[in-house]
Image (cartoon, rainbow, N blue to C red):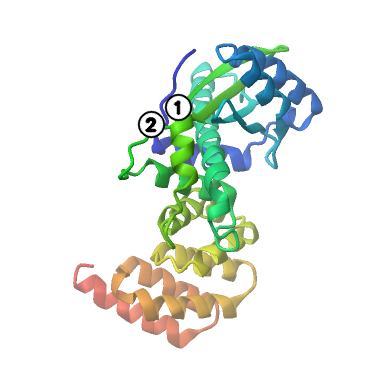
């Protein structure tokens, strides 16, 4: 079996594909059947009892990936399967396969971390599974007093029923699962990774592609967690302007200037001024433009 190492540089591209490219094949019951057949091959090195329990638990998630998270033989296993994305250009197809393999591993690891840790987090604050899984996974990988073995994982492409299927598996060893199940993140310990991932890999991608209404709930979640990021504030304000909510746009920009003005560059202040103007607040726009000019002259 070929081993794939996950690198964070693939995360943005992979998540973009997951949001905007949902293979139609995965929406059919036939793909679940094909995945079960592929799983027999993919999991062939594991004991029959483990393989049978994983396959029996396979189901399709909200994005139509086939997933399974189970406890077996004192370990916790997380499986993710999805159709490979085909392209007529071999080089493009190879790159898509690499992204999909990385993406599947990230999802498998995130689902594993969620299984272990989500009951210990406030789901009213950390709403979105994918960023929370990533934040928990990052948290569990941090150095700690008790030494644990890292998460094991691998991914490969399996041919089943004439289709190429991306398959990824991640699992905790019994000792790791035991240690991590008792590791409760301190309040706020997940916020930075969660908000950064939710913004950079979800909300900002939607925003830049013009999906303002879809991005706004994510920005509201970030705002509720009080993540102090100038760019996120301005993007959220532009979403409000783009969805016909100028008052909310102005309110958010004023909050930004009151709390993070010292961290804003001249370009960011200029962008804020333009949004004030679009939202109809001329005086605030002029004030932001003056600050931008002053900061530009000071080389900031």
Residue 163, how many percent across, how many down? 68, 16
In the shown orientation, is residue 241 left or right of residue 231?
Answer: right
Q: Nearer the viewer, residue 134 or 248?
A: 134
Say few, some or many: other residues with alpha carbon within 10 Å of mark 2 (under 14 / 14 to 19 / 20 or more). few
Q: Is residue 178 visible?
A: yes
Residue at 41%, 47% (x, y): give it: 139
In the shown orientation, is residue 123 left or right of residue 3?
Answer: right
Q: Nearer the viewer, residue 185 or 235?
A: 185
In the picture as drawn, the residue positioned furthest to the left comes out as: 298
Residue 10, how many percent across, how many down? 44, 35
In the shown orientation, is residue 154 left or right of residue 166?
Answer: left
Marker disc for residue 149:
2
Query: Are the two marked residues, 1 and 2, in contact with CB atoms closer than 8 angstroms?
Result: yes
Marker disc for residue 152:
1
Residue at 19%, 72% (x, y): give it: 298
Residue at 48%, 30% (x, y): give it: 174
Residue 295's place in the image compared with 24, above or below, is below
Residue at 57%, 25% (x, y): give it: 73
Indicate the quadrant where residue 290 lies.
bottom left
Q: Nearer the viewer, residue 75 or 66?
A: 75
Labels in figure, total: 2
Residue 162, how many percent across, how many down? 71, 11
Indicate the quadrant where residue 100 lies.
top right
Residue 59's place in the image compared with 188, above or below, is above
Say few, some or many: other residues with alpha carbon within 10 Å of mark 1 (under 14 / 14 to 19 / 20 or more). few
Whole-angstrom CA distance, mark 1 to mark 2, is: 8 Å
């Amino acid at each position: 079996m070929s081993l794939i190492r996950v690198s964070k540089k693939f995360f943005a591209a992979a998540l973009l594909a997951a949001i905007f490219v949902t293979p139609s094949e995965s929406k059919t019951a036939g793909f679940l059947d094909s995945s079960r057949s592929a799983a027999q091959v993919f999991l062939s090195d594991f004991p029959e009892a483990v393989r049978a329990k994983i396959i029996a638990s396979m189901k399709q998630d909200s994005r139509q990936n086939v997933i399974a998270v189970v406890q077996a033989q004192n370990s916790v296993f997380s499986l993710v399967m999805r159709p490979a994305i085909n392209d007529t250009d071999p080089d493009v197809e190879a790159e898509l396969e690499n992204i999909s393999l990385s993406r599947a591993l990230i999802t498998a690891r995130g689902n594993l971390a969620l299984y272990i840790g989500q009951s210990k987090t406030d789901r009213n604050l950390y709403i979105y599974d994918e960023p929370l899984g990533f934040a928990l996974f990052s948290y569990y990988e941090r150095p700690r007093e008790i030494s644990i073995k890292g998460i094991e994982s691998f991914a490969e492409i399996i041919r089943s029923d004439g289709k190429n299927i991306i398959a990824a598996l991640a699992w905790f060893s019994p000792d790791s699962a035991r240690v991590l199940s008792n590791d409760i993140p301190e309040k706020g310990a997940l916020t930075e990774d969660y908000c950064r991932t939710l913004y950079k890999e979800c909300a900002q991608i939607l925003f830049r592609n013009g999906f303002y209404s879809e991005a706004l709930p994510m920005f509201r979640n970030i705002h509720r967690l009080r993540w102090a990021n100038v760019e996120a504030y301005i993007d959220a304000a532009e979403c409000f302007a783009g969805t016909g909510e100028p008052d909310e746009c102005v309110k958010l920009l004023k909050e930004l200037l009151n709390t993070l003005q010292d961290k804003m560059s001249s370009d960011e202040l200029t962008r804020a001024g333009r949004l004030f103007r679009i939202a109809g607040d001329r005086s605030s726009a002029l004030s932001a433009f003056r600050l931008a000019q002053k900061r530009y002259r000071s080389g900031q």
